[in-house]
Amino acid sequence: MTATESASRTARERARTELTREIKEEARRQLAAHGGQGLSLRAVARELGMVSSALYRYFPSRDELLTALIIDAYDALGSAAEAASAGLPAAEARGRWRAVCGAVRDWALAHPHEYALIYGSPVPGYQAPQATIASAVRVVRVLGGLLTSACAAGDEPPPPLPPALGEQAAIVADAIAPDVPGAVILRGLTAWTQLFGMISFELFGQFIGSLDPADEFFGYAVEQMADFVGIP
Amino acid sequence: MTATESASRTARERARTELTREIKEEARRQLAAHGGQGLSLRAVARELGMVSSALYRYFPSRDELLTALIIDAYDALGSAAEAASAGLPAAEARGRWRAVCGAVRDWALAHPHEYALIYGSPVPGYQAPQATIASAVRVVRVLGGLLTSACAAGDEPPPPLPPALGEQAAIVADAIAPDVPGAVILRGLTAWTQLFGMISFELFGQFIGSLDPADEFFGYAVEQMADFVGIP
DNA sequence: GTCTATAACGAGATAGAC
DNA sequence: GTCTATCTCGTTATAGAC
């Protein structure tokens, strides 16, 4: 009976993806309460009314569950950035820049623990696998896409870079913004570190007593960054 | 016998400060191995051949020990920054800027776990007390001190800021660089977030596969920051 | 007064037998 | 899957050494 077989298989498949989703959801709650280091397969299982050994059918280890959470977080942030950029016509480069920076910050403020997981201190004993890079690069690629508008045809050629730095810039350009000169890439990378530095400071409490709330400062800095990078 | 009394008191005092130092030293080792969350009073005591309850003579709770480590880290970083700035004559503003940024990065690379403790994700369940702020502000004050050179007398007055932002800038100016106009303060704060954003990215692994090693990029960005802030 | 050691509590994690 | 024995944790009360 191939029909029932395939039907039952898809039902099983559905149950499996559903449970996988529930496990990750509960794991995110644990993340919020105890941090990435405190994530415990047993606690997740307990909260779900399961037995810890059952979880190993879905995630072969605690670290793999952590990896899944990290990839999900990078993807969620990447999606938010992509959507923000796509929400405006490509011609409005400055508007896209504002929208993307704002979307990144909004996502971070809405998901502080997931943000801390990917951009905060590394979890002791955990080594992120290569598989996370593809998702991590998405938000960088969105920023990189906005760089092309920063180097209009008429501009004078940028000064040459020191060789080692030029090589690194070329590698980055290859990955996120081909045909953009190295000097512009480097300004974009500076803006990248600046954007996330600001968000991390806000989220991790460095602004308390001075720039908190940081909405105005953030908006101000976003304009300064756009000017600095050369977004028209 | 006041002489022996005072002598024995100082001996005890010395033993006490010595043991306090050893406890913090061992705690820092634990920090490196298990992170801030994994810091355990019992483990520290065990490693020191003491009993856990004895530690309470020196630190009234685990969180107070954590606070002591945080303050020590901020102070070490602040001292490094102050020394770097004082190493050059005040007239060489650009040189001081380079030296301070380099010293901050060097300290962070040499003490990655202590850096993560103060600038990384917050430890779950731990709330840093106000007492940490005085030490935390030291490095910001050093940067602020360099801002005065960025606003020479002949410069045109900067454009006015939105009111709320101006107030925040005034608060910061009051604390780290009086008589510096708000717009310059804000550029300095931007550079501050940029500097630490870069170091955090380097330390937390975001540069792997692209800007790693980051020495050249860091040097390049430091010059850009100095230009942006207006350091002569 | 200052310190260390013993013992215990309640909560939580873990390992292994069943 | 379930249960239990055993571990670690932060913290406190208490007793005794210097």
Image: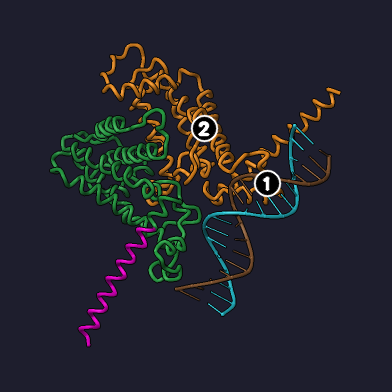
Chain colours: A green, B orange, C cyan, D brown
Q: Is residue D9 above or below residue A49?
A: above
Residue at the disc numbered 1:
B53
Which residue sits at x=19%, y=40%? A96
Disc 1: which chain?
B
Disc 2: which chain?
B
Residue at the disc numbered 2:
B132
Q: Is residue A16 magenta?
A: yes
Left/right placement of residue A182 relative to residue A89 reads: right
Q: For residue A202, what is the image quadrant?
A: top left
- Let me know if residue A23 appears in the view: yes
x, y percent for residue A147: 23, 41
Magenta stretch, residue numbers:
A1-26
Task: Determine the secondary structure under disc 1.
Answer: helix
x, y percent for residue A88: 15, 43
| Circle nearer the N terminus (1, 2) | 1
Q: Is residue A185 above or below residue A48?
A: above
x, y percent for residue A103: 25, 43
**Dot 2 surroundings within 10 Å: few (below 14), some, or many (20 or more)?**
some
- Give the amino acid at mark 1: Ser
- Give the amino acid at mark 2: Thr
Task: Determine the secondary structure under disc 2.
Answer: helix
